[in-house]
Amino acid sequence: MGLLTDPGKSEQMAKLLAKNYAKLSALAYIVGLCWTFAIVDDHFTLRTYFSENALLPGLVEPAFTSTDEAFAKMQYKLLIDLQRKPDSHFPVDFLHDAFRKLGLEAYVHSYNYTLPGDGHKHGKSVYAILRASRANSQESMVLAAPYRSSKTEKVRTEGGIALLLALAHQFRFKHYWAKDIIFLVTENEHIGAKAWVEAYHGIDSSVVASEPLKDRAGAIQAAITAEIPGPNLDYVDARIVGINGQMPNLDLLNLVRLLCSQQQIPLVIQGNSQLLERTPQNMMGHYLRDLQTASAMVTSAASGQLEGNHGFFQQFNIQSLTLRGLKKDANRNGRIGFLDLGIAFEGICRSLNNLLERFHQSFFFYIMPATQRFVSIGLYMPPLGILVLPLVLTALHLWSKGSFPVGEGNAAGGSSTVGTVLPWIVLSHAIGLGAFTVGLSALSTLPDTAAMMVGLGATLAVAFSTPVLTSRFLREADANLLHSLTLIELAVGLYALSMLNFSLALIVAMIAVPVAILQVPTNRTLRTLLGGLLLVTCPTLVMLGVKVWEGLRTGAVFSLNDLDKVKDEWLLPLSDLFMQYVVYGNWLSPVLCLFLLPVWVCTWMVYWTSG
């Protein structure tokens, strides 16, 4: 307490901080960055293990036989034939009758939905309930598959639907089920799953209007979504990242991995096919492969986007993931058929049937560099804290410059008060709120993006022109205080964001921290370089750049000569961020507009006010 109350001691600390803050900040950022990249190495990661022993994976004799495989192949052929018809559509009647013939309670769920720029549409889902013979419908599990037409650019799913019918065919004769089993087939991609899950829990949505479900099972404990194109696969890709970077309980992924390995089904995560190859013998090759896998998971979680329909189950505390069947070569048949897949899915269901309570004993926060290794929250949070530490050190130094001037130049600059810079902080947040409001309002004009072009242009114009005002009213001391408060806001915001979406906080910290802590130099060349660095790190321009990069990777050609192409190729992808917030609850657009953009505007003010 003496350091805080003794003016002499405080002044000594201010001088010490002024002398060493730059070195400490650089050291902290480098250490945090190196630590972040080091934790994916095998020496720092942990080997996966089961925390929930009640699952008892692999301790039962499989009952899925070649007869069930033949049934799956027959259903698969029927689904393919239905899709070949000229007027093919979602086979509601076929699926409803198929489940009814198997002796299950089958129902059709209808819903209406309205997407911005897509109009009012109607959809249906088919679900069937296999009642547990040893319980009273208190708990249940879900096996789901989306229906996709033959024209889809995504993975086909006829094999997954056929597998669900085959599993229902096999499960109906067994009397050891202690949980109800729900078989669910949805259309309209994510909207169908969203409508059904919300209707199951009695939630009213502003996007989807669903009719009440005709019947329900018990509380859902786990859900597995199957995106299986058919038999003859090479490997299975486990998609675990949900909305806003949410993860399922690690025991569920461990269960899937173990039962797939027993059937010699290669399993990868995040679509990294390099995991199928033999483990590299050299240390660098092994490390780079694990780094690529972990980076793919972090990037996917930071985007907050859906990787599969399992994300909607996770929003209701239902542990879920998506299993996607893939081939190495589309022209060559793989060795994995319905028999191997059926045995693996049966084992998953029977293990979940043994679960005595909700998943709670294993990890919910982790990063996977490989299928059998993970980085826990206790290992990846410290480097983020060190990465953000330079913001705190620089903020304290700038604050102390106003309280305890060090040197003649600082003394001449005088001091400042919070009341002086508060209006500019409020203005920066008003700009962010305006950008967010414009983005949401522009959704109502889709597919005509003229309103978004005007709104985006106006927002950028205001954001970039604010220094014209600030440079006339703020002194150097005011700029230092504004910079200090901005750094504090960024640090607190990143620490809070890391509790909600660690991956997003990590990527923002790696980019924003070195830019935010830089002092505006007097040298004209260095000042110009810093200004250019600030320009390219503007959140709006960064997101436009990311969308352009994604388009280039997929082969899109961007043209600045054709206005319609500019709107379609540049602005529609950007509007998708606001679309996902409205429809799915993705937090990325609010974080960009309401947090990062105001911080950037304040930093931009400091740049033009200083010097």
Image (cartoon, helix red, strand yellow):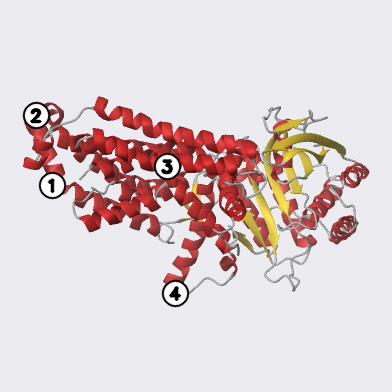
Residue at image mark 2:
7
Total number of numbered labels?
4
Residue 339 lies in what quarter of the image? bottom right
Give the distance between the C-alpha atoms of the residues marked 2 and 3, in whole angstroms.
45 Å
Q: Amino acid at mark 1?
A: Lys
Circles 2 and 3, Cβ within 8 Å, touching? The answer is: no
Q: Give the label on residue 375, or none.
A: none
* Callout 4: SS: loop
Q: Choose between 569 and 238: the one closer to the eye.
A: 569
561 relative to 108, above or below: below
State the image coordinates of residue 419 (x, y, percent, origin top left): 26, 25
Q: Give the label on residue 282, or none.
A: 4
Residue at image mark 1:
19
Give the distance between the C-alpha atoms of the residues marked 3 and 1, in whole angstroms.
38 Å
Does residue 457 show up? yes
* Callout 3: SS: helix
Q: Residues within 10 Å of mark 4 (few under 14, many from 20)?
A: few
Q: Quadrant of the C terminus?
A: top left
State the image coordinates of residue 492 (x, y, percent, origin top left): 35, 36
Q: Amino acid at mark 2?
A: Pro
Which of labels 3 and 1 is toward the front? 3
Does residue 407 show up? no
